[in-house]
Amino acid sequence: MRHFLSLYDFTKEEILEIIDLGKKIKEEAKVKNYIPYLQGQSLGMLFEKSSTRTRISFEVGIHQLGGQGLFLSSNDLQLGRGEPMKDSARVISRMVDMVMIRTYSQSVLDEFAAYSKVPIINGLTDKYHPVQLLADYLTMVENGKDKNPIVAYVGDGNNMTHSWMMLASKLGFELRVATPKGYEPLDEIIDDAKMLCEQSGGVVTYTNDPAIAVRGADVVTTDTWVSMGQEDEKEKRVGDFKGYIVDTELMSKAKEDAIFLHCLPAYRGYEVSEEVIEKYADIVFDEAENRLHAQKGLMVWLEKKR
Ligand code: CP
Ligand code: NVA
């Protein structure tokens, strides 16, 4: 049995296999051919943070695969009243076939997985957001940006950055990360990425200058400056991230046919300008839709490994 806690645990071949499966299932779904690969199965969806895309894509995804999704908000569970995570894991995993969790600490996810009888999927932690990267890479494939691309990530060194670092260093492409001073990715992930790049031929570089990162890039991406749980830091962050907006001027430094990606939700006037997000809206909302398809691929893949 496999869990999907981080891309670190997956080989290049496995990541591409999951994305291919998502692509195939997307093609089937286009003609409303919803093949019940997971007939009668239940997916527990445990949320300790808000969500639009993750909740809807997993709930609709499992339904289209012939199963059902259960939305479990920690506020409504005994978990919210202090039932230990390891007990919740042992109970929930005896009743459902797979569990997706969105929580704060990666260690909570790891603990849940350690006590679970069924596969666990990371639906976002403070450290990683790996399901988003499956959708992002599928979008790159669909836009012909999967052949030795240069990807520029501009903004906060957060869960999205860490996930891009894992993807680039596993698949072996070039990623340039531009963050303000003090908002760099975690050292341990920089070390992991370095080690993985030595094996894959990938290159991950770090700068405090967005223009250096974006110059000649095939894909430019960003994420909110204020992640869930950091609301109290908003004022300071907005000041510290001045100059890190992805606007038309910054995009003009990328390749002429470069694409822009955003995991969403987007905060216009902060990490991205209205003009840029609207210019690339078709791609950005394909990317959002691809959450559904890529995660269906993931769930079917995990089931196959049991
Ligand atoms: N991108 C993403 O995970 O969106 P939600 O927070 O709406 O799920
Ligand atoms: N970095 C953001 C991603 C939201 C999908 C957050 O954690 O809030």
Image: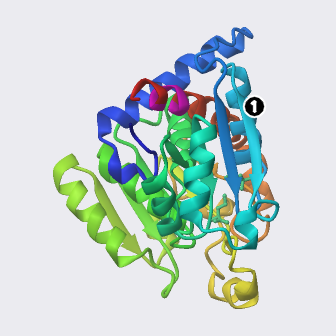
Image vertical order of residue 244 relative to residue 166, above or below: below
Q: Which residues are magenta?
A: 298-302
Q: Is residue 51 covered in magenta?
A: no
Specify whether 15 is left or right of 47: left
Q: Main secondary structure of the magenta part?
A: helix
Q: Residue at x 35, y 53 (%)?
A: 8
In the rendered view, would you say 80 is above or below 128? Answer: below
How many C-alpha atoms fall within 10 Å of the one at disc 1: few (<14), some, or many (≥20)? some
In magenta segment, residue 299? yes
Q: Residue at x 45, y 63 (%)?
A: 162
Residue 265 position within the rendered picture, expressed as x and y whole percent measured from the top left? 75, 57
**For residue 157, side relative to residue 232 (left or right):** left
Of the four image quadrants, the one with ligand 2 is bottom right
Picture residue at 61% right of the left edge, 53% below the top: 101
Identify which residue, 214 or 83, lies in the foreground: 83
Question: Which coloring applies here?
Answer: rainbow
Q: What residue does disc 1 label? A: 60
